[in-house]
Amino acid sequence: MQRAPRPAGATAGDADLVQRVLARDETAVRAVIAANNRRLYRLARGILRDDGEAEDVVQETYIKAFTHIESFRGDSSLATWLARIAINEALGRLRRQRSIAEWTSLADRPMEAQIIRFPLAAHDDPEKSMAQRQIRQVVERAIDELPEAFRLVFISRVIEGLNVEETADLLGVKPETVKTRLHRARVLLRDNVESKIGPIVMEAFPFAGRRCERLTAAVLERLGFN
């Protein structure tokens, strides 16, 4: 029986970035953030289903990663290493939220992070822009309603475009489990919603522009860069 290929470890580019981060090269720090922001945000949001909480997780992920960058061994890619930190951070927050929800007597107070509203980018065609936003909202709500295990596989495979082996390595499951969960996720999504995913799926849960710049500035400030 043919053995499935093992996910690739760190590349020469990863090793170079890590060495530059260790030397406190601000350009390298910015490069790592720019390359990983969207994936980390989507994974965190896939677990927490809250924009503000997901953004906090991304920031904490970078702080933990950059302050312990010497622990990166290169067994997996730098992107996968960061994604695992983000997933663990998000799951930890989710467990704390559930614990508080179970034991607090202040059940009438919503325990949600403040969601920071960001201005939408201007488009030449307002009607097209509105239609795309509406469809994207339908897509995001449908994804949010998936069970957590299916949601993470769906985000990794369909939205992020990772292959089966990469997704299995990221989530710590078998490739067969990835295939099964993706199939179940597709079944659970309504046909009329799934048919709209194609043209705009890469637009879902955007994390770029001023939002990306603001998070980069916050991380650099916390790391002590001027």
Image (cartoon, rainbow, N blue to C red):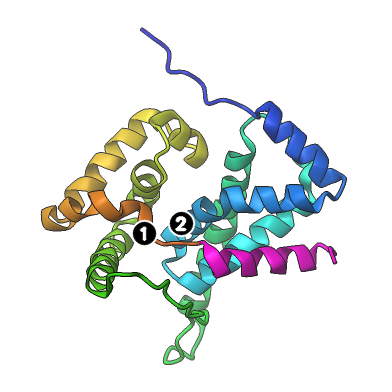
- Identify the image quadrant of the C terminus: bottom right
Residue 169: where, in percent of width, then height?
Answer: 50, 34
| Up-down relation of residue 6 to residue 1 (above or below) | below
Alpha-carbon neighbours of circle 2 within 10 Å: few (<14), some, or many (≥20)?
A: many
Residue 54: where, in percent of width, then height?
Answer: 52, 65
**Is residue 58 or residue 36 the one in the foreground?**
36
The residue that appears at 64% across and 53% down in the rendered structure is: 33
Is disc 1 placed on a helix, strand or loop?
A: loop
Whether residue 28 can be seen here: yes
Magenta span includes 40: no
**Is residue 104 or residue 86 the one in the foreground?**
86
Q: Which mark is residue 219?
A: none
Q: Which residue is mark 2?
A: 42
The residue that appears at 47% across and 71% down in the rendered structure is: 51
Magenta span includes 213: yes
Q: Are marks 2 and 1 in contact (CB under 8 Å)?
A: yes
**Is residue 76 or residue 122 the one in the foreground?**
122
- Taking the image as shown, residue 155 lies to the left or right of residue 127, namely right
- Taking the image as shown, residue 93 lies to the left or right of residue 131, namely right
- Taking the image as shown, residue 100 lies to the left or right of residue 144, namely right
| Up-down relation of residue 161 to residue 134 (above or below) | above
At label 1, which amino acid type do we have? Ala
The residue that appears at 31% across and 63% down in the rendered structure is: 140
Is disc 2 placed on a helix, strand or loop?
A: helix
Q: Which residues are magenta?
A: 208-226
Alpha-carbon neighbours of circle 1 within 10 Å: few (<14), some, or many (≥20)?
A: some
At label 2, which amino acid type do we have? Arg
Q: Which residue is mark 1?
A: 204
